[in-house]
Image (spheres, rainbow, N blue to C red):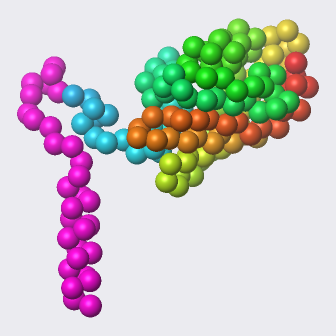
Amino acid sequence: MRQVISTLIVLIMLQACTSQATTTTSDSQKPSYRETQTMTNLDIVKSTYEGKTSEENGKNLQRYMTSETLWTEAAGFPYAGTYQGFEQIEKHVFARLGSEWIGYNFAVEDYVAAGDKVIAYGTYSGTYKTSGKHFKARVAHLWQLKDGKIVSFEQFVDSKTVNDAM
């Protein structure tokens, strides 16, 4: 029994020592927190929602995507489909959200993370420019990551409330 406990203590200590080391540099040359720490899958997903600006969120999203990343908007949603790579996602989803809606937003309520998957859930809201109608819809986003990169994103949403606003 003592041998098992000793082995567990050693493993825990080794795990605690796996974060990357940094060297001391001047303040202007110090790496950012994200450059010195290994980000978890949850940290990566949070960085795409919780930046100071939408532009920061977009840059973080692009930073963790690859040309192979698949992005699926739910069937029945106005932008339904599966898009590959940031350029397609920007063109078919984000550009349209920015040009067709006023104040389109995803208010994250919470996250659930397990292994290579992270779920963000909350509420979409916005006002469609053409109709002037406002909506709110419950939504969940399922992210899958591998080696610090986003493999896929899948949206689950009450599309009817969004379509009714259009």
Q: Position of residue 129 (x, y in %)?
A: 80, 11
The stretch of residues the image draws in magenta is: 1-30
User: Where the C terminus falls, by quadrant?
Assistant: top right
- Total number of numbered discs in the rendering: 0
| Residue 51 vs residue 91, the one in the foreground | 91
129, above or below 89, in the image: above
Q: Position of residue 131 (x, y in %)?
A: 88, 13
Is 96 on the left or on the right of 147, as rendered? right
Q: Residue at x 26, y 83 (%)?
A: 4
Regarding residue 46, the answer to whether it shows in the image is no
Is 90 on the left or on the right of 166, as rendered? left
Q: Position of residue 73 (x, y in %)?
A: 73, 29
| Residue 3 vs residue 27, the one in the foreground | 3
Regarding residue 28, the answer to whether it shows in the image is yes
Is 71 on the left or on the right of 19, as rendered? right
In this view, the residue farthest toward the front is 68
Does the stretch in magenta take in 134? no
Q: Residue at x 40, y 45 (%)?
A: 40
116, above or below 95, in the image: below
Q: Residue at x 68, y 18 (%)?
A: 93
Q: Position of residue 147 (x, y in %)?
A: 41, 40
Q: Residue at x 57, y 14 (%)?
A: 87
Does the stretch in magenta take in 7? yes
Which quadrant of the structure image shows residue 13? Answer: bottom left
Which quadrant of the structure image shows residue 94? Answer: top right
User: Where the N terminus falls, by quadrant?
Assistant: bottom left
In this view, the residue farthest toward the right is 164
| Residue 56 vs residue 132, the one in the foreground | 56
Q: Main secondary structure of the magenta part?
A: helix
